[in-house]
Image (cartoon, rainbow, N blue to C red):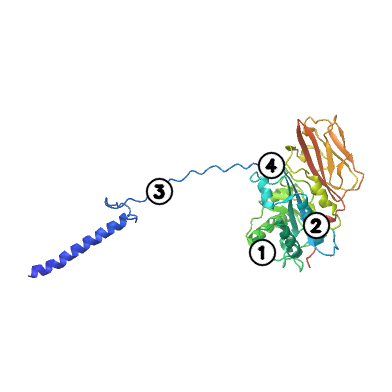
Amino acid sequence: MRLKLVAVPVLLALILAACNKKQKDQTIGEGSTPGRGGSVPPSASAPPTVAPVATPTAPVKVAIDQTAQVIVYGYHRFVNQVRRPDTEITPQMFEQQMQELKNRGISVIGMQDFLAWKRGEKNIPPRCAVITFDDGWKSQYDVAWPIMKKFGYTFTMFIYTEGVRGGHFGGGEAITWEQLAEMRDAGIDIQAHTETHQDLRKPYDKVAKKKLSPPEYEQWLQNEVGRCKETLEQRLGVKVNCFAVPYGFYNQHVKDVAKGLGYEAVFTVYGQPITYRSAMDSLGRYLIEGNKPKVFADAIGMIATSSGGGAPVAEIGSSNIASKPADGETIRNPLPLISANLSAFGAIEPGTVTMRVSGLGLVPASFDPKTNTVSYQVTQKLRDKCSVIVEAKSGGKKVEAHWTFAVEGSGATTSPTSKK
């Protein structure tokens, strides 16, 4: 009797252990991963079959229209009464100009679409415009932006960070960081325009009122060009890849610093049509001034008037044509002799050489086939900023060269003012 009482609990324990083991084995077989060295019982279901990873297909190559042309406009303040025409324009004139782009069939595209086209990643319409606003004035937010919304146009803001509200130059007429964030959220592109808006070529800090030694100048230049980029990226969480030099003043060192700090494109104020092959470190913009409405029309007239892309164009760099005045040069004489050596064009077909000058249009230039030199003596005083386009046919193809120069006495040399 005592033996039976002892055997019963032992028997129950063995039965319970066997049941637990069977349940555990079934659980592992249904999907749990066995421990290292474990095995799945034969009775367990097989693990699910993993589908093979598809081989990624090569990206579709985009067909790029290399004959497309782009003009870039630059604006500052929008006021009802113009007192400083070099930086101000009325809202009415601005709206008329935006309407003119629509009437002329010129597409307004975003800065990043323009850069994607230049990289060969995206196509754009044959004739385009990019709209930019400089400095960061409040009127860009509450006057110009509603007009741009009306047309469905996008634009780029070139901001100098000490000009934002609360900064060294950020008075009551300055835009705020909150307004910039609102515009960013609406898809507006925000890019860099230095910290304090000074002539980057000169070793003098106007804010500190101090002449800079060579090492001090290099650090100051790094701050103006680089810290501005960092501030915008950190405050707004955006990618800054474009830089507009204040007043359009630059030299090779400024361009090298900007490139070294990660900028993809550098913009000046020497307006010129931009082509697929235009250099990215000196892209010219047409700055619109309240007393010079013809600049806007000139820019439209400088790009192709046809709706199609036209014949392919080979562009020759300005450094290969020995232009006078030279590309980027500032001259005193408002009636210069403009010339260029077109030997780099190849065998030029007779009667095909033309020259266009901003503010003047097509001019009666002469071409000497013996020296391959095209020249034109200006008879009407040029404005402060001038761009030249020379075209010809060579080997059945169109060839062209662009360059820009400035005339001393430009209104663009004024110092930045506090936005009060």
Q: How far is mark 1 from mark 3, CA to CA?
A: 46 Å
Q: How far is mark 3 from mark 2, CA to CA?
A: 62 Å
The amino acid type found where label 1 is placed reads Glu
Marked residue nearer the N-terminal end (4 or 3): 3
Q: Is residue 363 above or below residue 209?
A: above
The amino acid type found where label 3 is placed reads Val
Label number found at residue 182: 1
Q: Residue at x 19, y 62 (%)?
A: 15
Q: Residues within 10 Å of mark 3 (few under 14, many from 20)?
A: few
Q: How far is mark 1 from mark 4, CA to CA?
A: 34 Å
Mark whose residue sits in front, 2 or 1: 2
Label number found at residue 96: 2
Q: Position of residue 353 (x, y in %)?
A: 83, 35
Q: Residues within 10 Å of mark 1 (few under 14, many from 20)?
A: some
Left or right placement of residue 258 versus residue 204 in this view: left
Q: Are marks 4 and 3 in contact (CB under 8 Å)?
A: no
Label number found at residue 65: 4
Q: How far is mark 2 from mark 4, CA to CA?
A: 29 Å
Q: Secondary structure at mark 1?
A: helix
The amino acid type found where label 2 is placed reads Gln
Mark whose residue sits in front, 2 or 4: 2
